[in-house]
Amino acid sequence: MAQRPVVLLGEVHDNASQHAARAEALRRLVAGGVRPAIAFEQFDRERQADLDRARTEPLARGASRVDHLIEQGGGSNSWKWSLYRPYLQLALDHELPIVAANLSRPAAMRVAQQGYAAELGAELRAAHRLDQLPAGFLDAHERALESTHCGLTPAAMLPALARAQIARDLTLTEAIRPHFERGVILLAGNGHVRNDIGVPFFLSADERARTLSIGLLESTGSDEEATQFDVTIRTRPQPREDPCAALRQRYSPATGSPSR
């Protein structure tokens, strides 16, 4: 990580051993004198001003600054914040910028339903030729989404979901771009930092040369996954309930349609 100013640091969101390794790596990086911005998929881009204000405004007696940041930054309860608090504390301790990097769920839904123009400006759409994306790029997104949704999502929904994912990746890219000179670490799911279809796809050649993508994968993952990043680190799987169970309940096995 010390060799490149821009690091795309992947994760399996609920894997505690991965978070422990990443937090330790960041602590060592900062101890060595590096002062990067830290960009979070976990905060939506609209909450940047809230995060900036929450860093310095008075706290109630006994309140935690990190918890205040999470609350004021609109941190969703869907994230396991105990795993992300160490990064926020590190940023506070060393006065590192905290970047709200993600496209919100409502905004992503608008892109899925209405197209890129619903949330992304004309100049940005033209610069990245969103109306001329390679067919292979779109297919790869749909395959990835099909896999992460346990093969249960109706095929007709995949193009819309792919649009939303692409818009998220581009939003993450634009969020970290202003911090390239200083250096920036993006904390995001592995899918967002893949070289072939994630954030690196939207970087210029010069930006890409300054960027390192690191995938933190569980040991049960496929060999193909390891080819999608500059560096791959394997960790033990996180004990969890069957992640496909909820989707099996949502979609009828007989028709592939929502069961309720």
Image (cartoon, rainbow, N blue to C red):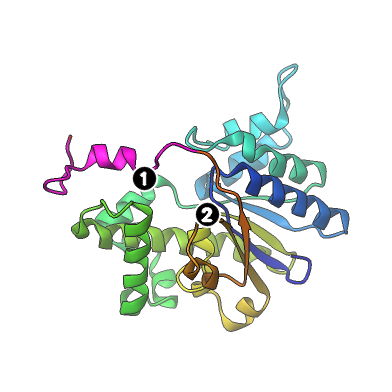
Q: Which region of the structure is painted magenta? A: 240-259
Compared across the picture, whether 247 is left or right of 123 comes to left
Q: Which residue is rendered at x = 64% and y = 64% of the image?
A: 178
Q: Quadrant of the N terminus?
A: bottom right
Residue 206, percent from left and from top: 63, 82
Considering only vertical position in the picture, is 201 above or below 54?
Answer: below
Q: Relative to the observer, which residue lies in front, 113 or 11?
A: 11
Residue 90 counted in the magenta span? no
Compared across the picture, whether 103 is left or right of 88 comes to left
- The residue positioned farthest toward the right in the image shown: 32
Q: Quadrant of residue 124?
A: bottom left
What's under tag 1, amino acid-wise? Answer: Pro
Q: Residues within 10 Å of mark 2 (few under 14, many from 20)?
A: some
- The residue positioned farthest toward the top in the image shown: 61
Q: What number is the disc on residue 189? A: 2
Q: Relative to the observer, which residue lies in front, 63 or 192?
A: 192
Q: Is residue 133 visible?
A: no
Q: What number is the disc on residue 106? A: 1
Residue 169, percent from left and from top: 47, 62
Q: Which SS class for mark 2?
A: loop
User: What secondary structure is the magenta-colored segment mainly?
Assistant: loop
What's under tag 2, amino acid-wise? Answer: Gly
Residue 11, percent from left and from top: 57, 53
